[in-house]
Image: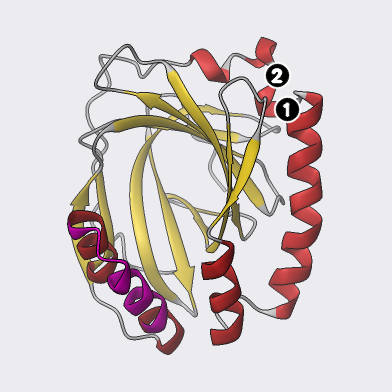
Amino acid sequence: MREFQPGQTAVRRDVFRRKVWSAHALRVVEDTAEALVLGCRPGAESLAPTTWIESLLTGDETARLRALANLANGNWQLGRWTWRDTAHLQWVPPDSWFSVNAFFDAAGDDRLTRWYVNFQHPMRRTPIGFDTFDLLLDLVVAPDLSRWDWKDEDEYAHGRRLGVVSEADHRAVEKAREEAVAMIEGAVGPFAAERGLGTWRYEPHWPDPQLPTGVLDLV
């Protein structure tokens, strides 16, 4: 599969039972044996379930529950969404059941506001980027790594009941939890100060990432 060059567009797609659940256009920062690293800023183009978009715009938590039910039964519609409010960096290593995201205040001084560990299927590279699947559980980490909090554990449990998260997924996530916490406690990998991810800035000359044609086509 192709190696991406800095500045190219790569699309992250979340795919469930051979159907695209979401698609996000991102800019490649680097592509190495360690990880595919991608950047995003307000204005980046994406596709997302309409119920998820509704929950973001209205704050209606029942819309999130409907989104999960629609996911479980394979009945969802995608709508256009433009990323807003924050810039973020995604560190996606091969064969790992989590990625690490660094979020920055795009409207202020571009400071790092939080780290965010996203538990997901190991990435599968595609001609336009990579496919994965978000497993609903997240870990929110302070910028200085001084504390962390588990997020959406109720949603994760509900996803298990609905069959969205399989038992095999759950076993992999349990192991990945330990791996992620060990990285945070050791300040290693993407969290290492010398790695520099916490001081990343989006290249100003890069245009907003756009989704390519055929983004819903699976191979």
Image location of residue 193, percent across then percent down: 67, 13
Q: Are marks 1 and 2 in contact (CB under 8 Å)?
A: yes
Question: Is-magenta flag for residue 215?
Answer: no
Image location of residue 18, percent across then percent down: 46, 77
Gap in angstroms between the C-alphas marked 1 and 2: 6 Å
The image quarter in which residue 62 lies: bottom left
Magenta residues (range) = 58-69
Nearer-the-camera pick, 100 or 149: 149
Amino acid on which disc 1 is placed: Gly
Q: Secondary structure at mark 1?
A: helix
Seen at 73% across and 79% down, the residue is: 167
| Label 2 neighbour load within 10 Å: few <14, some 14-19, many 20+ | some
The image quarter in which residue 162 lies: bottom right
* Left-right relation of 178 to 161: right
Q: Which mark is residue 189?
A: 1
Report if residue 211 is visible in the image. no
Image location of residue 149, percent across then percent down: 61, 44
Question: Is-magenta flag for residue 62?
Answer: yes
Seen at 45% across and 24% down, the residue is: 6
* Left-right relation of 96 to 11: right
* Left-right relation of 135 to 167: left
Q: Secondary structure at mark 2?
A: loop
Image location of residue 218, percent across then percent down: 41, 69
Seen at 41% across and 15% down, the residue is: 111
Q: Furthest-bottom residue in view?
A: 73
Figure check: 44 above or below 66: above
| Label 1 neighbour load within 10 Å: few <14, some 14-19, many 20+ | some
Seen at 45% across and 52% down, the residue is: 127
Q: Which residue is mark 2?
A: 192
